[in-house]
Image: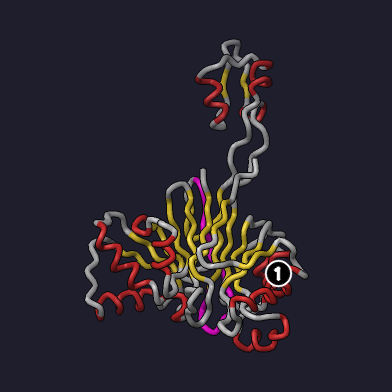
Amino acid sequence: MNFEVFILGTSGMMPLPNRHLTSAMVRRDGELFLFDCGEGTQVSLKRLNLKWKKIDSIFISHMHADHVTGLPGILMLSSQVDRDDPLTIYGPPRLKEYVDANRRILDMYINYEIIVRVAEPGIIIDNDEYTVSAFPLLHTKPCVGYVMEEKERAGVFNVERAKELNVPMGPLWGKLQRGEAVRLPDGTVIESDQVMGQKRSGRKMSYVTDTAYLPTIAEAVNGSDLLLCEGMFTADMEETAAEKRHLTASQAATIARDGQVAQLALMHYSPRYSDWELKYLLRDAQEIFGPTVLGRDRMSFDLPLKD
């Protein structure tokens, strides 16, 4: 089962020739999840050949233009492909007002249901396979980060142990693998945990932008296989970052280190840095957290299962 993450845009504040505004996408087993929708999102989706018409949910971090200006285009374009499934958009309280105003003023033709929900801190999606959670950030407007995490999978079925316990091959093996206890012909009851290994962890991706540094962020993203996090300024700009309630690359790396994540991908860079100057952000981050990469537009990550 695949779990892929695509960075669609890495620029903060304004788009640049090689950097669209902030957005990212997760593709998991055929489902698509969009995180923020800055200007240029459609361009990256097209270049990556991602089937945007199959987007299941959109998660908006906050109501600043560089995170939502691509949304009207996505909503209108989805009406051109005979979409039948509803589209759910999660975000801050004023998100519905923004969506409704665009639909009215632009006289949008929408032939599918749009559901807008406030992303209250806590679990906002919970099904048999994964959860999506929101957690509070500290910015100049209400802002949340997001965590998408797969639930634990069953352990590996021990065939030899099942044979030792005289469990006949067939339907009883299936029941044990589903976590059910079974009764043998001689009356012996075999519990599932007698033949199943330890439960196996799923994969976890976290998305953090725009915020001042908060120690609680590391707790929210703890154990992530991949953390997409803004690194807007170099370390020498920490005072400016605090005033504007943004993160330096060093602070992003501190979050990654303290949260024991596997990999950090920086994004949401200040336009003050040219492409060749982004190496200074990477340098700052890697001094604190080695497994850091510079996120680039249309970069992708394949998160494999650990076992």
Q: Is residue 215 magenta?
A: no
- Counting every numbered tag in the picture gives 1
* Point 48% across, 66% down: residue: 8
Bin the neighbour count of mark 1 within 10 Å (Cα to Cα): few under 14, some 14-19, many 20 and up: many
Q: Give 54 or 197, whichever is nearer the viewer.
A: 54
Q: Position of residue 130 (x, y in %)?
A: 52, 50
Q: Position of residue 240 (x, y in %)?
A: 65, 88
Q: Is residue 135 magenta?
A: yes
Q: Is residue 64 left or right of residue 114?
A: right
* Point 62% across, 26% down: residue: 191
Q: Residue furthest top?
A: 186
Q: Residue furthest right?
A: 287
- In the image, what residue type sits under mark 1? Ala
Q: Is residue 198 positioned above or below 245 on the image?
A: above
Q: Is residue 177 left or right of residue 69?
A: right
Q: Give 249 or 202, whichever is nearer the viewer.
A: 249
Element carrying mark 1: helix
Q: Is residue 74 positioned above or below 81 on the image?
A: below
Is there any visible trace of residue 269 in the rendered image?
A: yes
Q: Quadrant of residue 255?
A: bottom right
Q: Quadrant of residue 213?
A: bottom right
Indicate the quadrant containing the C terminus: top left, top right, bottom left or bottom right.
top right
Q: Residue furthest front?
A: 276
* Point 53% across, 57% down: residue: 5
Q: Which residue is mark 1?
A: 253
Is there any visible trace of residue 122 in the rendered image?
A: no
Q: Which residues are magenta?
A: 129-143
Colour mode of the rendering: secondary structure
Q: Is residue 103 positioned above or below 28 on the image?
A: below
Q: Position of residue 55 (x, y in %)?
A: 39, 58
Q: Position of residue 225 (x, y in %)?
A: 63, 55
